[in-house]
Image (cartoon, rainbow, N blue to C red):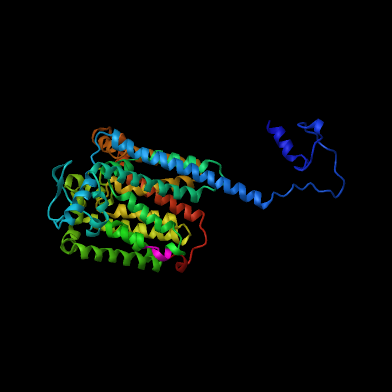
Amino acid sequence: MTTIAGCWLCSPISMGDQLPGSARGLLTVPGPRPAGETTTRPRVPDATRDTDSLRAARRDRALRAAAIAVIAPLGAWIIARWISAVNPVDFLVYRYAAVMALHGRDVYSGYIAGPRIGGQGLPYTYTPFALLALLPTALGTWHAAYDGWIVAAALAVAWAENAVVVRLIPLGSGTRRAAVLASALALTAFSTMFVNEVSFGQVNSLLMAACLADRFRPRQGRWARVVPPGVLIGIATAIKLTPGLFICYFLVTRQWRLARNSALSAAVCLLVAAFFYPGISDQFLTAVLWHLSSRVALSHGAFIGSGNQSVPGLLAAIGPWTGALRAPASVAAAAAGLWAARFCHRRGDELGAWLITAIAAQLASPVSWAHHWIWLAPAILLAALRAPTRAGRACAAVVTAMVIVGASPGEYALRSGPAWLFPLAAAQRECLIVAGVWCCAMFMIHATRYSAEPVPAELSG
């Protein structure tokens, strides 16, 4: 069949040749053509090509929309309904704290307690502006609000992965875009980042979507005039401080407009919060902010446990003697991440630079729980799609398996497994750190091999 097809493709029969009716369906090869006669194929009209492209684009959008609409909410529903340990305590803290602040009660002096939050309660660890941003969690019954919240979180992750897919896979690839997106969504639904994000009812996926929206949206036009680029990152920073590393990234890459807009929007959000909650804002800025890591860590045991996937947490797990090294190591992780992001930015890989910045924020933070690492969902997908060799794709598969398995088996193997298993167990215990560092390395390798013309700072910002 291959030989026949190759002969047909190489034969001099023109697409415009017509066979007699009696010989319709038969393939005859004409003799040599007269000298000077060409065998050009008829030109496909531009209108036909445009129609086919439009049809392919519509089909592609429909398939990707169907994958998102089915897989993303279904994954969140399975986690919330079928995993018996699910108790969305973080979501309930958002809900109760927003209501408490609305009624003039202090949310920082004690723990937030209420139905389904066991023991003495949990601390509120976010900014005063977050109390305003999280007011939608207080709408309706807690169960209905939680269901809507986790669907929004799943759709935010799906949107981020879809944005990666459409930028790396060309449109004329049949159903490959939809197939890759569906596979990525299914694998993400089983990852330890997403399971923790949904089961605790966390806000990280929505903050990630806000930050990436500032990356993907147009820099010009009506939308950019209404909400200037960088504003969404400023809002995310005003809710949770870790996205603030993006402002540092804008400064080191001289994207002055993005740095200005994000810093100003964060400041405006904090001023708005101070207007509505002056006492709470004063307490946050003068006391809570400087001891925030101890509130987030909950306890020393949690801080040194496998759940804390950060460089300071890793050092704390090694032993108490590393106490003096944690702050310098945190600064070094942030500085190394900014250097790597600047490296990618200067070579035209802006998406890789943004994801490196987000990963560096989790590495440098004193406490990074598994749900903080939701940024790995688009990061691993981007690194996997860019892998040029089988070895690179195999590494992507191993990293994906590690984040699906999670840190707990590594912790158990370290305590109870044989000595020869120690290196693998240690890597699995810090699986999210390993995955983040691997993604950063892949982005830098890609930027080195396939560097584009650097984008001027005045255009990129």
Residues 21 and 389: in front is: 21
Q: Residue at x 38, y 46 (%)?
A: 155
Tell me where residue 274 appears, x and y as whole percent.
21, 64
- Which quarter shows the N terminus? top right
- Which quarter shows the C terminus? bottom left
Q: Is residue 331 visible?
A: yes
Tell me where residue 269 appears, x and y as whole percent.
28, 63
Residues 365 and 267: in front is: 267
Magenta segment: does it hold 94? no
Q: Quadrant of residue 278?
A: bottom left
Q: Is residue 124 visible?
A: no
Q: Residue at x 46, y 52 (%)?
A: 445
Residues 282 and 99: in front is: 99
User: In this image, 242 relative to 38: left or right?
Assistant: left
Magenta segment: does it hold 226? yes
**Residue situated furthest right in the rendering:** 34
Give the total number of marks visible in the rendering. Answer: 0
Tell me where residue 341 appears, x and y as whole percent.
40, 58
- Point out the stretch of residues depicted in magenta: 224-230
Tell me where residue 284 appears, x and y as whole percent.
18, 61
**Residue situated furthest front in the rendering:** 140
User: In this image, 126 relative to 379: left or right?
Assistant: left
